[in-house]
Amino acid sequence: MPHAFRTLALKAGEPCGDRCAIWLRPSGILLAIIDGLGHGPEAARAAAVAERTIAGHLDFALRGLFQELDRNLQPLRGAALGVARIADGVLTYCGVGNPRAWLLRDGRTIHLPADYGVVGAGLPAELSVHAIGLEDRDWIILASDGVSERVQIETILPEWGRNPEKFCDYILHYWRDPRDDAAVLVYRFDAGEAGA
């Protein structure tokens, strides 16, 4: 299950307010993209609290997880968030704010939408949760809004499968917004892996 993630702060030496995380568990895999609002130390603090919250509630259903996140981020700046769970060959995704989420399959890009809002400022009355069956060697890409939503990747290069860090580097090199923090996570689904 090749995977990698990268983060880049707006200014060198400044804390990055965007984070990625992945948890590999026997029951499944959880992927998260976290974008603390704005940038700098306060955004980084909100992102760190969000990551700790997810880590402490890995088995929660996604709607319940977002409720915990909303409570814990209320005293802070808030965040845009996307969380994907992979279990039994199904990707389940929930996003709030403007995280980017795509499924890449055979040269085709499927966009996974997010609900409007800010985690920490009250959630929509009914969060949308999207489920899609995965196929072998599908790629899941999660990114903050420091990556353009117009990202175009028509072909997955063989070296990206062998070294997914190069995939992250490609996305950040060609599709990053230089006016913001940025983060990207890539994950390839391999149907034969445990927890898939």
Image: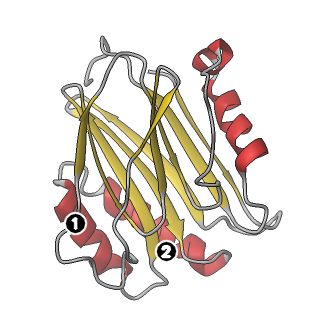
Inter-mark Cα distance, 2 to 1 = 21 Å
Q: Nearer the viewer, mark 2 or mark 1?
A: 1
Q: Earlier in the sequence, mark 2 or mark 1?
A: 2
Please provide percent x and percent y for residue 169.
Answer: 72, 37
Q: Which residue: 58% across, 75% down?
A: 43
Q: Secondary structure at mark 2?
A: helix
Q: Which residue: 62% across, 50% down?
A: 150
Please provide percent x and percent y for residue 146.
Answer: 65, 60
Mark 2: few/some/many CA within 10 Å (<14, 14-19, 20+): many
> The residue under label 1 is which amino acid type?
Leu
Q: Which residue: 53% across, 36% down?
A: 186
| Position of 10 relative to 89 (above/below) | below
Quarter-wise, where is residue 170 in the image? Answer: top right
| Position of 162 relative to 68 (above/below) | above
Mark 1: few/some/many CA within 10 Å (<14, 14-19, 20+): some
> The residue under label 2 is which amino acid type?
Ala
Q: What is the basis of the colouring in this image?
A: secondary structure
| Position of 4 relative to 20 (above/below) | above
Q: Nearer the viewer, residue 139 or 67?
A: 139
**Label 1, on which residue?**
127
Question: The C terminus is located in which quarter?
Answer: top left
**Label 2, on which residue?**
46
Report the number of discs.
2
| Position of 174 relative to 177 (above/below) | above
Q: Are marks 2 and 1 in contact (CB under 8 Å)?
A: no
Horizontal side of 24 relative to 80 (left or right) equals left
